[in-house]
Image (spheres, rainbow, N blue to C red):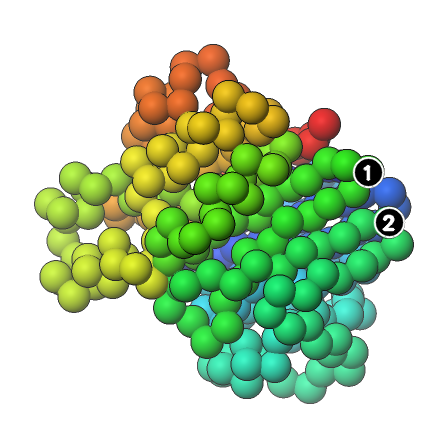
Amino acid sequence: MLTFSLNSGSNGNAIYVEADGVALMFDAGLSAVEARRRMNAHGRDPNDLDALIVSHEHSDHISGAGVWHRKFGTPLYVTPMTLSAADPPLGRLRDVRWFMSGQTLEFGRVRVHSIPTPHDARDPHCFVVEHDGRRLGILTDLGHVFGGLANLIEELDAAYLESNYDPDMLELGPYPWRLKQRIRGPRGHLSNVEAADLAAPAARGRLKWIAAAHLSEENNTPRLALATHRKRIGRYFDVRLAPRYEPSEMFEVV
């Protein structure tokens, strides 16, 4: 299984995964032009995508979905509540394929498990992609460390894991109090510390790498996120980064 992040953060999210000849895109928070450019940088063509799977209706995850769907002819996988909550609407859609919370989607021998999260959206989900015994987690916009999440991570070989903010930067930063409370509240995002503590037990077992994802521009830095993870997980564990402004390197799930 191969994967890379096209972009990860409040300025746009999209993650590509391929396995067994199946090409999947999770979220579409970039323009179609930018998506093509970033996929081409890794030798991939958006016209070859088998599915565009949307996690929830926040603009950094869904804003490009309608145009991607029409321009590249990609089937759009989304829950009814997520599509109805999209603002602005996605426009004319020719091939919408519904999934429901907890459903497993099948693409040949590739399976995508949908897991509901307590993030502040209408019907938010994270995902696990499974092929040939290997399991990749796409775990962002989690809300909080909800029941079963720790066990889920222990069953993964690799994961994109939300590591949104540094607690001190958020506390001392310029955001108004209500926004700070939303971010660190039970329907917001995981901090560097929460993400690292969540991954630590799994890092001693099956988990081979994590990519710190969905970093805040105002309340985090790549250096802080990586340092926190390496300190709490172990300096020799493979901690990677899903950047905010460019595609990541190509990662392999083995």
Q: Dots 1 and 2: beta carbons under 8 Å?
A: yes
The residue tagged 1 is 132
Q: Looking at the image, which residue sits at the far top?
A: 236
Q: Is residue 60 left or right of residue 22?
A: left
In percent of width and height, residue 42 lies at: 71, 38
Tell me if I can see residue 247 in this picture. Answer: no
Looking at the rendered structure, the secondary structure element under dot 1 is: loop
Q: Which amino acid lies under the numbered mark 1 shown in the image of this protein?
A: Asp
What residue is rendered at 43% in x and 45% in y?
162
Give the vertical position of 237 relative to 72 (above or below).
above
Please give the name of the residue rendered at 86% of the width and 43% of the height, measured from the top-left corner.
20
Quadrant placement of the N terminus: top right
Residue wearing tag 2: 109
Picture disc at residue 228: none
The percent coordinates of residue 58 (x first, y second) are 45, 69
Quarter of the image for residue 133 reads top right
Q: Of residues 84 and 142, which is closer to you in this image?
A: 142
